[in-house]
Each structure stands twice: as structure tokens, then as C-alpha cells.
């Protein structure tokens, strides 16, 4: 299976540790994994201009780093969204990457999805999980799992092993 992981963190700390644990497990199981550091990319929000559906033939009028991840939206069998929680929501960078798939309607091949979230605080995940479930449900992707880590759980070897095991068993 071809898996695209969109890491929405602009920093390389807790969310990146979750992404690494997932990628190691998936690769050990023989899956092809590509990690995209969308938290460090310049992806603007959707303008709602409808160029993509009127004149663009599925291409967005904006020319930014979306072009680097669009092949993943078209070719991956599974999409994994990963983000720290900043003030009760996923990062703006990951949200832009999720919303801009609008230009092609939905991921072309992806039938599965997962979510990895990290935070310093517990009980801050509801909004992010609801957004993920609504988006992936709309896009017709099966939710394979949601992982949330906070505080001392971040980078905890046992928690990282759980994520690795999950990815190995996809």
C-alpha cells in the first residue's frame, strides 16, 4: 500500500516522533511511505474562486507548495494526517493541505486514513478529531485509527511502540 503522511507541525518534536514511529511500522510491513512536512510548506487557504472547477480542469489557480503534495492526493492508497494541537485545533498548515484537495474533489485513490495528534494538554482533541472524521467521511475514506498523545505521553517509548504496531498491522 502507498501511504502519504502529511505532518502539519512546523517543528520537529512530538508530532514528528509520532510520524517516525508510524512510518517505521508501515515500512516494516512492506508499505511504501512518503512523509510530507506540510507544516514547513507554504500552502495558502482555498480562495473559493472555483477556477479549479471551471477553467483549471482540477488544478488550483494558486501556485504554491500544494503542487508538492498533490501527487500524493492522487496516488496514495492511504492518507495519514499528523498535527500538534494549537489552541484546540490542528495547525493552519495541515488544515490548508486538507482543504485545498477541493480542487480535485477528494483524494483519487485513498480509501483509508488515520490521524496522529500531539499536545501538551489532555482533553483538547475534540475539534480536531471531529474535523478529521467529517473530512475523511466526506472524502469516502475509512478511519483506520486516531492516536492522541499529551504531556508525558509524547515520545513515550510504549506509546511510540503502539503507533508502530498499528502501522505494522495495516
Image: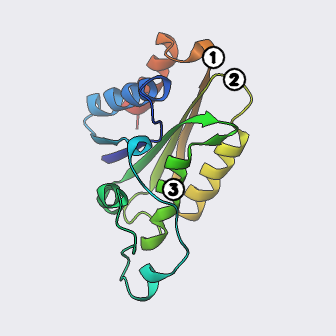
Q: What SS does tag 2 mark?
A: loop
Asked where in the image residue 70 lies, by quadrant, the reply is bottom left
Q: How is the image coloured?
A: rainbow
Q: Quadrant of residue 169?
A: top left
Task: Compute the Cα span from label 2 to label 1.
Answer: 6 Å
Q: CA distance from mark 2 to mark 3?
A: 24 Å
Q: Residue at x 27, y 28 (%)?
A: 28
> Which residue is rendered at x = 48% and y = 63% of the image?
100
Determine the CA span between mark 3 and mark 1.
Answer: 26 Å
Check the picture and name the quadrant holding the C terminus. Answer: top left
Residue at 40% across / 69% down in the picture? 62
- 106 horizontally vs 76: left or right: right
Tell me, yes or no, whether the two marked residues, 3 and 1, touch with CB atoms within 8 Å: no
Where residue 168 sits in the image (x, y, percent)?
37, 30
Mark 3, residue position = 96
Say which label, 3 or 1, has the lower sequence index: 3
Give the residue number, with chain letter if any, for mark 1: 151
Within-10-Å neighbours for mark 3: few <14, some 14–19, many 20+: some
Residue at horizontal 48%, vertical 48%? Answer: 113
Disc 3 is placed on an element classified as helix
Amino acid at each position: 500500500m502507498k501511504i502519504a503522511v502529511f505532518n502539519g507541525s512546523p517543528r520537529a518534536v512530538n508530532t514528528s516522533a509520532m510520524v517516525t514511529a508510524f512510518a517505521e511500522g508501515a515500512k516494516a510491513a512492506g508499505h511504501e511511505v512518503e512523509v510530507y512536512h506540510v507544516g514547513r510548506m507554504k500552502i495558502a487557504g482555498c480562495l473559493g474562486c472555483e477556477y479549479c472547477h471551471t477553467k483549471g480542469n482540477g488544478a488550483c489557480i494558486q501556485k504554491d507548495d500544494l503542487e508538492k503534495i498533490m501527487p500524493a492526493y492522487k496516488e496514495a492508497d492511504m492518507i495519514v494526517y499528523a498535527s500538534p494541537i494549537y489552541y484546540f485545533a490542528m495547525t493552519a498548515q495541515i488544515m490548508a493541505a486538507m482543504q485545498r484537495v477541493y480542487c480535485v474533489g477528494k483524494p483519487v485513490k485513498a480509501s483509508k486514513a488515520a490521524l496522529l495528534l500531539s499536545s501538551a494538554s489532555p482533553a483538547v482533541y475534540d475539534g480536531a478529531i471531529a474535523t478529521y472524521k467529517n473530512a475523511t467521511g466526506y472524502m469516502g475514506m475509512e478511519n483506520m485509527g486516531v492516536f492522541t498523545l499529551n504531556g508525558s505521553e509524547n515520545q513515550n517509548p510504549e506509546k511510540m511502540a503502539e503507533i508502530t504496531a498499528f502501522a505494522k498491522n495495516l
